[in-house]
Amino acid sequence: MGSPSSTPVRRLLLKVSGEGFAKEGETALDTDRVRALAKQLRVLTSEGVQVATVIGGGNILRGAQSAHLGITRATGDYMGMLATVINGLALSDSLESNGVPSRVMSAIDVHKVCEPFIRRRAIRHMEKGRVVVLVGGLGNPYFTTDTTAAQRAAELDCDALFKATMVDGVYDKDPKKHDDAVFLPELSFAEVLEKQYRVMDLTAFALCRENDLPIVVFNMDDPDAVVQAARGDKVGTRISN
Ligand code: UDP
């Protein structure tokens, strides 16, 4: 694809939505998609890139949707956080099957299945070439895994936040509804706010902006996108100050 547009990334935080772990319109885990991601991460780590991933849970449950099931919001949020643990275990298992060492670290205590999130330990894992799979969100209700991704990217001293989505990047309007939607490869944080483009929730976005953390949004189904973005090639939409 394109020529280098930015410096290669040394350490990155990859956010993957739960829906990226399911077939379109379905809620179960799609192991083919999980495996495809694991293979991309294998290439990344073989190139010496340090990787942490934050996994969403939207394919299983989102807290905000729990009210109509008669479940209180906070409980629904905890259920959503547990959903991310299931997705994270699937990714870690797939990584290990593909020869990539990984560690699952959770913000909520589930010590039978994964480690607690401890910042310095997470950094050490990455330095040793292990992919750190961060689950359980921030451990508190009323937050999202987008906000988790932004917070952890800052805390773990990552060079960029990569957001794998179901679209190629940011458009001026929804490409699924408008044939004339224009793709936007490069944006500033100010432009995103001014034009009200939906990239991630506002808390997550503000954290990235304040911490001068570039965001790259790309299509999860593009088999080379993560690797290209990490090399600094033009792929998806890049948002920076
Ligand atoms: N969640 C939460 N606190 C967090 C992160 C997540 O309460 O710090 C809950 C929330 O209910 C959310 C669900 O976990 O809806 C799954 O995360 P999210 O919706 O961000 O997943 P995604 O949309 O990325 O699949």
Image (cartoon, rainbow, N blue to C red):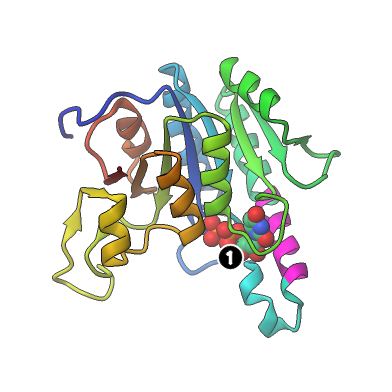
Left or right: where does residue 4 sit relative to residue 155?
Answer: left
| Residue at horizontal 44 percent and vertical 44 percent from the top | 210
Can you name the residue that lies furthest to the front here?
A: 210
Residue 59 appears anywhere in the view: no
The residue lying toward the viewer, choosing from 183 and 227, is 183
Q: Which amino acid does label 1 sit on?
A: Thr
Query: Which quarter of the figure has residue 92?
Result: top right
Describe residue 145's horizontal placement relative to residue 106 as left or right: left
What residue span does the magenta drawing correspond to? 74-85
Q: Quadrant of the N terminus?
A: top left
- Residue 222 x/y as whole percent: 32, 44
Q: Is residue 67 magenta-colored?
A: no
Q: Nearer the viewer, residue 62 or 188?
A: 188
Residue 48: x and y in percent read 45, 16
Q: Is 84 within the magenta?
A: yes
Is 168 rendered above or below residue 106? below
